């Protein structure tokens, strides 16, 4: 385990990331107190974020009567 302060971490982030990728844990301190720990992640556990399928919701929406440009212009004119 390697311990560095915030300034050292900023100056040596590339080196620290290389060390982490080879298995070394890095602890970052501020004023002598540990505030963060950088560890290698297990890539097999990472999943891409899943967003709900909205095709069915979009199919239920009525067609637009006005274009977005027309709507924005109308809203701007109301403010004046």
Image: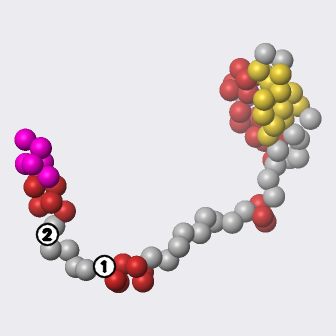
Q: Which quarter of the rendered picture does the N terminus lie within? A: top right
* Quarter of the figure with residue 66: bottom left
Q: Residue at x 61, y 64 (%)?
A: 49
Q: Residue at x 79, y 53 (%)?
A: 41
Q: Answer few, some or many: residues within 10 Å of disc 2's Cα (few below 14, many 20 plus, some between 14 and 19).
A: few
* Quarter of the figure with residue 7: top right
Residue reaching furthest to the right: 1
- Chief secondary structure of the magenta span? helix
In screen coordinates, is 67 left or right of 59?
Answer: left
State how many labels appear.
2
Q: Nearer the viewer, residue 73 or 20?
A: 73
Q: Position of residue 78 (x, y in %)?
A: 9, 48
| Coloration of the structure image | secondary structure
* Quarter of the figure with residue 46: bottom right
Q: Residue at x 45, y 76 (%)?
A: 54
The numbered mark, 1 or 2, whose residue comes first in the sequence reads: 1
Residue topped by disc 2: 66
Magenta includes 77?
Answer: yes
Residue topped by disc 1: 61
Q: Secondary structure at mark 2?
A: loop
Above or below, 66 relative to 43: below
Q: Which quarter of the rendered picture does the C terminus lie within? A: top left
CB atoms of marks 1 and 2 within 8 Å: no
């Amino acid at each position: 385990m390697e311990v560095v302060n915030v300034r050292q971490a900023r100056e040596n982030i590339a080196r620290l990331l290389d060390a982490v990728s080879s298995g070394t844990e890095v602890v970052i301190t501020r004023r002598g107190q540990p505030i963060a720990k950088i560890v290698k992640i297990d890539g097999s556990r990472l999943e891409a974020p899943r967003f709900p399928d909205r095709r069915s919701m979009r199919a239920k929406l009525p067609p637009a009567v006005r274009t977005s440009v027309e709507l924005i212009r109308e809203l701007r004119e109301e403010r004046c």
